[in-house]
Amino acid sequence: MPKVVLEYKEEAKRRIVKHAMKLFSERGYYQTRMIDIANSMGVSKGAIYQYFSSKYEILIAVLEAHTTLREQEVRSFLDSGLSSLATGEFFDRMLAIRMSTPPLGPDIFREAARNKSLMEWFRINSEKWLQEFVDLLNEQKKDGVIRSGVDTEPLARGILALRDGLYSSLSLGTDIAKARTAWVEIMRILLKENLDEA
C-alpha cells in the first residue's frame, strides 16, 4: 500500500479516536453511538466502519491514546529529574489527564465487569504500564539518580498504588488539596529513601 494511503488511513483513525474521546468524555461510552461519532465528524456511519469494526474497538483505541498521553507526560516530567514526580504540579497534571473523561470512567469499569476481553486488556496493559514505569526508573538508576541497590519494581508498584489510591479517594469526596499534599509528602519520603545522594 502506498505511503500516502497509509498516512491518510492513520490520520483518519486518529480523527475518529479524537471525536470519540470527546463524545465519550461528555456523554459516556454507553450514551455515545457510532452515528454520533460520525455526525460529529460530518461523515457517514459507514465511513467510521471502514476503520473500526465496532464502538468497542474505538474504545480500545481511545484507551490506548489516553495511555500514550500519560506516558508522554511522565517522561516530560522525568526530563526535569525524578524529584519532579514529587510535586503538586505532577499530581495536578496526572489528575487532569485522568479526569479529562469523567463520564467514561464508570462506564469503562461497568463494561469491564461484563466484558472479559476488556478486563483482559486492562490486566495486560496494567502489567505493561508497570513494566514501562520500572524501565523509566531503571533508566534513572543507570544514570545514578536512584541508588544501585534499589529494586525498582516494588518502588514502581508502590508509586502506582499510591496514585491509584489517592485518585480513587477523590471519587469518594476527598479534598483535592489534601490528596495533592499526601502525594507530595509520601513521594518525597519514597524518593529520599531511594535516591542516590552520594
Image (spheres, rainbow, N blue to C red):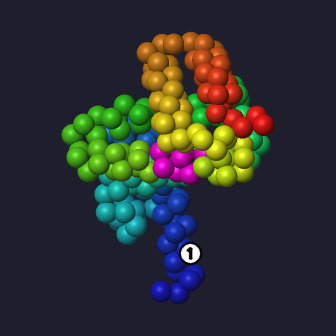
Q: In front here: 19 or 173?
A: 173
Q: Using the rendered image of the protein, determine whether residue 35 is visible from the camera's viewpoint.
A: no
- Residue 95 on the magenta segment: no
Q: Is residue 119 left or right of residue 161?
A: left
Q: Is residue 164 above or below residue 140?
A: above
Task: Name the residue at the bottom extreme.
Answer: 2
Q: Give the total of numbered labels.
A: 1
Residue at 21% across, 40% down: 114
Residue at 48% across, 13% down: 173
Residue at 52% across, 69% down: 10
Query: Magenta stretch?
Result: 130-137
Q: Using the rendered image of the protein, determine whether residue 191 is visible from the camera's viewpoint.
A: yes
Q: Is residue 56 left or right of residue 86?
A: left
Decide whether the magenta segment is chiefly helix, strand or loop.
Answer: helix
**Residue under numbered circle 1:** 7
Q: Is residue 117 left or right of residue 140?
A: left
- Residue 133 on the magenta segment: yes
Q: Quadrant of the C terminus?
A: top right
Q: Is residue 52 left or right of residue 67?
A: left
Looking at the rendered structure, the kind of residue marked 1 is Glu
Instruction: Indicate the position of residue 7 as horizontal and vertical percent values.
Output: 56, 75
Q: In front here: 198 or 146?
A: 198
